[in-house]
Amino acid sequence: MIKSLPIRIRLTLWYSLAIAATMFTIGFISLWMVHRAINDLENEELQQRVRSVRRFVESRPAGETRAQLHDAITAAYNVSHGNKWLQVIDEQGNWIYRSPHVAAAYPKLVLPQQAPAAGAYFTYTAESSSVRALIEPISIHGVRYTVQTGLTLNKTLAILSNLRMQLFLLITIGLFVSSLAGHFMSRKALKPVAVLAAQARRINDRNLDIRLPVPRAKDEISDLSQTLNQMLERIDKAFASVRSFTGNASHELRTPISLLRTEIEVGLYRPRANEEYRAILRRLHEQTVRMTGLVENLLSLARADGGAETITIAPVRVSVLFSQIADTWKSTMNQAMLDLCVETPENDLILLCDFQDIARLLSILLENASKYTPPGGVVKLKAAVDGECIVLSVHDTGIGIAPEHKLRIFDRFYRATPACAGVPAGSGLGLALAKWIAERHGAELNVTSNPGCGSCFSFSLRKTAPALADIHAICAPTAEPEVELLSSARSPSRAS
């Protein structure tokens, strides 16, 4: 029920409950302390009366008879204690002194041998009055006496009753005032939150550049504002990335689709010879392959962004990986009049990775090298040991990358330079996909390049014991169709 109330009301209720509990506790403790203080004062006065009787009896002669002691104490105490609750009894039960109040209200006698040695306090009612009494034995000149004395509690009870009433009124007024103060303070404390909520309602997908005000005070409200602003910044970047991605993807797909439509319309315009139809189909096939590669890369990046891609880490023999990739790319390099070199150390290298993903990454790098290396150049696929890691790299003797483009070549749809003559431009997605594959393996895709001197792309993976390599030997050949598909999809480029 309370959880359904507004937070302002809940804060007021909790604040009021806390104040009420505190005030009731303080009131109860105060009442108890006052009652205890009064009780201590009453006990002290009763003990003082007992000491007074002791001193009086001790001052009398030792051989004095009971009658003489009675007459002496009566003459002395009737004046000062006649209206008090006081009686003195010897061990035979004879009255030594008895005030009129005790005689009328408390006729019961307690002999000295019956009284507790340390004395006893008790309360009784006499003549509609509550009395706080003390019974204590004393021994003087070898004779034991019992002193019984008391105080009326009417004044004490009146004081306590008045105090309870005053505390009740004070707590009631304090609770009412504290509730008003709690409500006011909750409104004051939550006002910055209301301002933030009003500002946040103004923000939509068309004005994500708006930021919430950050209070100067270093408190929870400022932390909330900064957190929301950081979230808005991430959302703004995500929206910008989605808009850019959608626009670039639409632009990249528009060109091959337009070419397909044009070729089909030209082919249908009039009857043609078989060779002309074969040429048209060949061009249609090239555009279809290009679109297939683009769509594959788009789907891969979309799955990567959505976290739907999974990897299977297993021991992979570098020689098997390089052999399959080299067989796949041999004909492509020959057609481009490039020399493909594969270089691995003599010892058997085993690395931990996802075979399909690493094959795809290396295929993207090899395709970039084949596009940007002039005929007669060299493309090198290399593996080298670096401590507990294996560095895989692709070197080429191509046109290189200008320094101003190095920081952006891994951005999606970014193309720094046009492709070599006769090679269609890529989509700008290949290197973005390659970087993502390296990162999910815990590696970083690095590039070193100088214009006109070629480029080198490299990344490091953990190595493992050669005895585990045969685990992956059975499933390794299944990667060949994937590599062939990547080699035929001509989408990545040097800056793709």
Image (cartoon, rainbow, N blue to C red):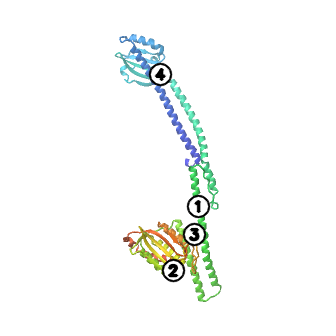
Q: Earlier in the sequence, mark 2 or mark 4?
A: 4
Rounded to the nearest angstrom, the CA distance separating label 3 from label 2 is 24 Å
Which numbered disc covers residue 151?
Answer: 4
Q: Earlier in the sequence, mark 3 or mark 2?
A: 2
Q: Amino acid at mark 1?
A: Ile
Which numbered disc, 1 or 3, marks the residue closer to the eye? 3
Rounded to the nearest angstrom, the CA distance separating label 3 from label 4 is 103 Å
Q: Is residue 68 above or below residue 327?
A: above
Q: Earlier in the sequence, mark 2 or mark 1?
A: 1
User: At 45% from the left edge and 11% from the top edge, which residue is drawn?
Assistant: 75
Q: Earlier in the sequence, mark 4 or mark 1?
A: 4
Name the secondary structure under disc 1. Answer: helix
Q: Is residue 108 visible?
A: no
Q: Amino acid at mark 3?
A: Glu
Q: Are marks 1 and 3 in contact (CB under 8 Å)?
A: no
Residue to which mark 3 is pinned: 404
Q: Amino acid at mark 4?
A: Leu
Q: Is residue 450 above or below residue 186?
A: below
Residue to which mark 2 is pinned: 377
Q: Is residue 189 above or below residue 309?
A: above
- Please rate how many residues cluster around mark 4, counting C-alpha atoms within 10 Å: few if below 14, some from 14 to 19, many from 20: many
Percent x, y of residue 356: 47, 73
State the residue in front, 388 or 26. 388
Rounded to the nearest angstrom, the CA distance separating label 2 from label 1 is 45 Å
Percent x, y of residue 272: 62, 88
Q: Amino acid at mark 2?
A: Gly
Q: Is residue 137 left or right of residue 369?
A: left
Name the secondary structure under disc 3. Answer: helix
Residue to which mark 1 is pinned: 235
- The quarter of the displayed image where residue 188 is located: top right
Which numbered disc covers residue 120?
Answer: none
Q: Earlier in the sequence, mark 3 or mark 4?
A: 4
